Amino acid sequence: MNLFSLLKPETILSELEVSDKQELISVLVDALSDKIGAVHLQEVKDAVWEREQVMSTGVGKGLAIPHCKTELVDENHGAFAVLKEPLEFNSVDDTPVRLVFLLVGPNEKNSIHIKLLSRISRLMNSGTFREQVFSCESSQQILEAFQEEEEKYFPG
């Protein structure tokens, strides 16, 4: 499964302004309302926040990957944000985040969930790719950047 196939222009939030981690998670989950269903949004927010309380998903280099697994979805869904201002996230390297990839997956597809988390981390580890994302002027351009980078790193 490709990351870019999890994203749509409406689930990519560019120049997002939020005041804290909890608001960020809420906004990202809300971006998935068409996929998750409005009645389940709060439950998914709670699940992501609960996971975040166990250990920060700020993985370093200005990237966070908040995520959860839940019985409320049958497949993986993603949302991505480029923050206008860096946000403190208790990251492993103490660097505030500006890039955030939310992943929500079903309980029974654990191996796919782990593979997707790994793929996000590998892609975003590229300084060139991160700079490319920062230079994008629209959600569509960010989506295209993900597709191009994935095809380069993970051909076929």
Image (cartoon, rainbow, N blue to C red):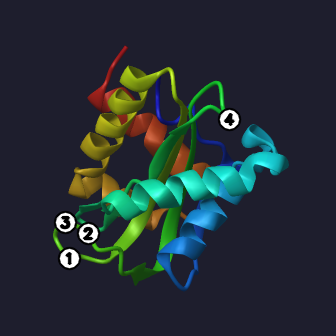
Residue 46 x %, y %: 59, 58
Callout 1 crowding tier (Cα within 10 Å): few <14, some 14–19, many ≥20? some
Label count reads 4
Q: In the rendered image, is residue 142 in sight?
A: yes
The amino acid type, in three-letter code, at marker 2 is Ser
Q: Is residue 133 left or right of residue 7?
A: left
Label 2 to label 1, Cα distance in Å?
A: 5 Å
**Is there CB contact under 8 Å for labels 2 and 1?**
yes
Labels 2 and 4: the sequence-earlier one: 4
- Asked which secondary structure carries label 3, the reply is loop
Residue of label 1: 94
Residue of label 2: 91
- Asked which secondary structure carries label 4, the reply is loop
Residue of label 3: 92
Q: Is residue 131 left or right of residue 104?
A: left
Foreground residue among 74 and 60: 74
**Is there CB contact under 8 Å for labels 2 and 4?**
no
**Is there CB contact under 8 Å for labels 4 and 3?**
no
The amino acid type, in three-letter code, at marker 4 is Leu
Number of the front mark, 4 or 1: 4
Residue at image x 48%, y 58%? 50
The amino acid type, in three-letter code, at marker 3 is Val
Residue 92 x %, y %: 19, 66
Residue of label 4: 72
Q: In the rendered image, is residue 57 in sight?
A: no
**The quarter of the displayed image where residue 133 is located:** bottom left
